[in-house]
Amino acid sequence: MEKVNVAVLGATGAVGRTMIRILQERRFPMRSLKLLASPHSAGKVIDLGAKTGIVEEFSPAALKDVDLVFGAVDNDLVEEYAPLIQRSGALFVDNSSAFRLEEDVPLVIPEINARDIRWHHGIVANPNCATILAMMALSPILKLTRVKRMIVSTYQAVSGAGMKGMDELERQIRDPSAAPEVFPFPIAFNVIPQIGDFDENGISAEEWKMQNEGRRILHDEALQVSCTCVRVPVYRCHSESIYVETETEVSLDAIRQAAEECPGLVLNEAPYPTPKECTDSDAVVIGRLRRDEACPHGLHLWCCCDQLRKGAATNAVQIGEWAWQNGLLKKGV
């Protein structure tokens, strides 16, 4: 198969830099790699290992001959740039939330619903990092039965807010009196039960994403999802406590056996995973698997993953790999 001309849009941010690293680690079949960003980041130098790359300003001309664009920029830029990428004929794998709930845009975790990539119209959306972690953690259960309801509490690292989030935690550790700029309250030595703005019902933007994205990925509009999303003073790796109610009763041993057959998933019951051990890994690690004593169809588990990798960059690169392997790169508008 022919190699691919690739561009990373948002190459200077935490997710963009991680995308570049993962493309190299996974030996993605690149003929060329363009580093693109908004005008204020143009001209910056990115370390590519054996060489360096110069960041170019995004423009239609910069898309010439590009087959695949990985996006790691905010919604406002995505909404401006996406039509230009579509018209170029390149496939746009977008990490923002701009298109995740659009009916004609696949929302994909390759281990779960890769076949949805087949019906793309030039854009495939990468789910929210917390959604990816939850869906991957539930994958062995989903092999055995339908999940009717899930209640999730998240413990989300500051790098979910980008490099500026990590810088703020570092600054406040050194000086606890430093005023918050990125988060609504000081994050060092603290937890903040808010990620994104609240709506009129008191649901945060992050919670709203989780409640809606899982239904699309599983093609199950009846799935009931409730969640509380919390920012914690951890540099990297999100964690989640998940309670699910299943349609039929399943044994813990059956779930453990199914977990062994789920790509990208690791079961750690000796004694459980933590964010520190999962940093810089692509695996979603689950543990503390147990029954709910009050509900025969209720199950609890704990899970962790590096949200910059599988929660964002690695998932996007996997989408690109699957599209390339199945001849689906050139399907723009």
Image: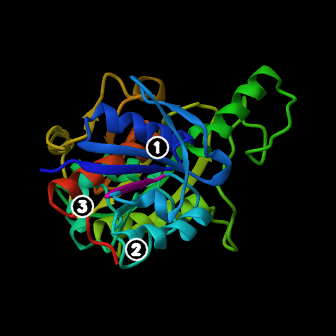
What's the residue type where badge 3 is placed?
Asn
Residue at left offset 25%, top offset 35%: 27
Earlier residue among tags 1 and 3:
3
Q: Amino acid at mark 2?
A: Arg
Q: Amino acid at mark 1?
A: Glu
- Residue 226 in magenta stretch: no
| Disc marking residue 190 | none
- Picture layout, residue 102 above or below residue 183: below
- Mark 3 = which residue? 113
Where is residue 28, by image quadrant? Answer: top left
Q: Secondary structure at mark 3?
A: helix
Which of the labelled discs sits on residue 240, or is there none? 1
- Give the left or right position of residue 152, taking residue 12 as reference: left
Q: Position of residue 96 (x, y in %)?
A: 51, 59
| Sequence order check, earlier mark of 1 and 2 | 2
Instruction: Bin the neighbour count of mark 3 within 10 Å (Cα to Cα): few under 14, some 14-19, many 20 and up.
Output: some
Nearest to the eye among marks 1 and 3: give it.
Answer: 3
Q: Which residues are magenta?
A: 67-71
State the residue position of label 2.
87
Left-right relation of 137 to 250:
right
